[in-house]
């Protein structure tokens, strides 16, 4: 697929002492949901601000829609929508009134206001003022503003930050719907891998201004370095070890038995063997290295 966003050795510093971004090569494919991951202070917001022209690039190139950003800034910005940090809304106005103001700026049709309200699930808010909205509703209204001119690309900075579980789900499902039904390419930053994992097709991990990984979710999952183990607790762990060690590589740790996990059939075989020998099995379940732990491993080693 063609690239919607491409940066070449993008670097930026707020001071001479430390680089905020160090040779970042970002590649966002058309039609993808790209999860831009990193701890707070890693350089995510700085990167997004550079992509939108909110900061002046110091070194490196930026291409969006296959065009050099510095030469086609206005043309490019007309084709994308964005939400960086806090939403800019008029608290004393309704959702529809807020959108009406931006509609005139974007020169969109009046029907488009009704369309985006329905799209983000705010069509029934009536005369309720934006200041009375929940955080999730405010975030969805802000995304509605960004969608008024039907952008091909949506750039969002931590859109679920500060939301409760329901608000997080609302925003996540909205982004998946935009991507699936309208083929909107989404670049979304976050410091929570677990959330990105539920919606992203591609992932980029940045830490201390450097890109540590970029690729699809399956490619990230293949980087798992820790062996999945089957964790076992019995009424007599020493005897259980004696029974299992002829067939498995067995270890004891923190009062539990650990053997390399292969599949569910192996777990059933272990359980059956212990029960046949008259043992009580208190717990038996696999412990796998999840993506969140992998994220911690990648960033802590750099």
Image (cartoon, rainbow, N blue to C red):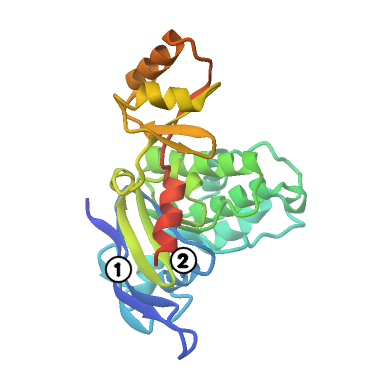
98 with respect to 266 (left or right):
right
Residue 229's quadrant in the figure? top left
Which residue is denoted by mark 1 in the rendering? 25
- In the rendered image, residue 21, in percent from the top left (x then y), is placed at 40, 76
Q: Residues within 10 Å of mark 2 (few under 14, many from 20)?
A: many
Q: Which mark is residue 44?
A: 2
Residue drawn where x is 46% and y is 23% of the image: 239
Whether residue 78 appears in this view of the structure is: no
Q: Which mark is residue 209?
A: none
Residue drawn where x is 47% and y is 50% of the image: 193
Closer to the chain start, of discs 1 and 2, is 1
- In the rendered image, residue 291, in percent from the top left (x then y), is placed at 42, 46
Residue drawn where x is 45% and y is 40% of the image: 198
Q: Secondary structure at mark 2?
A: helix
Taking 30 as reference, is 60 above or below it? Answer: below
**What is the spatial separation of the Cα atoms under label 1 and label 2, in whole angstroms?**
13 Å
Whether residue 294 appears in this view of the structure is: yes
Residue drawn where x is 56% and y is 47% of the image: 113
241 with respect to 105 (left or right):
left
């Amino acid at each position: 697929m063609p690239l919607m966003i491409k940066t070449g050795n993008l670097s930026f510093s707020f001071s001479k002492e430390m680089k905020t971004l160090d040779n970042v090569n970002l590649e966002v494919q058309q039609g993808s949901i790209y999860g831009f991951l990193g701890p707070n202070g890693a350089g995510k917001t700085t990167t997004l601000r550079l992509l939108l022209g909110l900061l002046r690039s110091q070194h490196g190139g930026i291409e969006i829609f296959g065009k050099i950003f510095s030469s086609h800034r206005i043309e490019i910005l007309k084709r994308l929508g964005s939400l960086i940090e806090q939403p800019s809304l008029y608290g004393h106005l309704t959702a529809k009134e807020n959108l009406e103001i931006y509609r005139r700026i974007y020169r969109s049709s009046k029907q488009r206001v009704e369309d985006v309200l329905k799209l983000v699930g705010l069509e029934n808010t009536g005369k309720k003022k934006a200041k009375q909205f929940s955080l999730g509703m405010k975030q969805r209204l802000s995304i509605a503003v960004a969608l008024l001119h039907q952008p091909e690309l949506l750039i969002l900075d931590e859109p679920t930050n500060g939301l409760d579980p329901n608000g997080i789900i609302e925003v996540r499902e909205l982004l998946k719907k935009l991507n699936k039904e309208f083929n909107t390419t989404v670049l979304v930053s976050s410091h929570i891998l677990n959330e990105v994992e539920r919606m992203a097709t591609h992932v980029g991990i940045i830490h201390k201004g450097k890109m540590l990984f970029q690729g699809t979710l399956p490619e990230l999952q293949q980087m798992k370095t820790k062996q999945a183990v089957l964790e076992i607790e019995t009424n007599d762990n020493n005897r259980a070890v004696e029974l299992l060690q002829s067939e498995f590589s067995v270890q004891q740790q923190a009062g539990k038995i650990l053997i390399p996990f292969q599949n569910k059939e192996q777990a059933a075989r272990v359980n059956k063997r212990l029960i046949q020998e008259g043992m009580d099995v208190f717990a038996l379940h696999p412990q796998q290295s999840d993506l969140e732990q992998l994220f911690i491993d990648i960033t802590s080693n750099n």
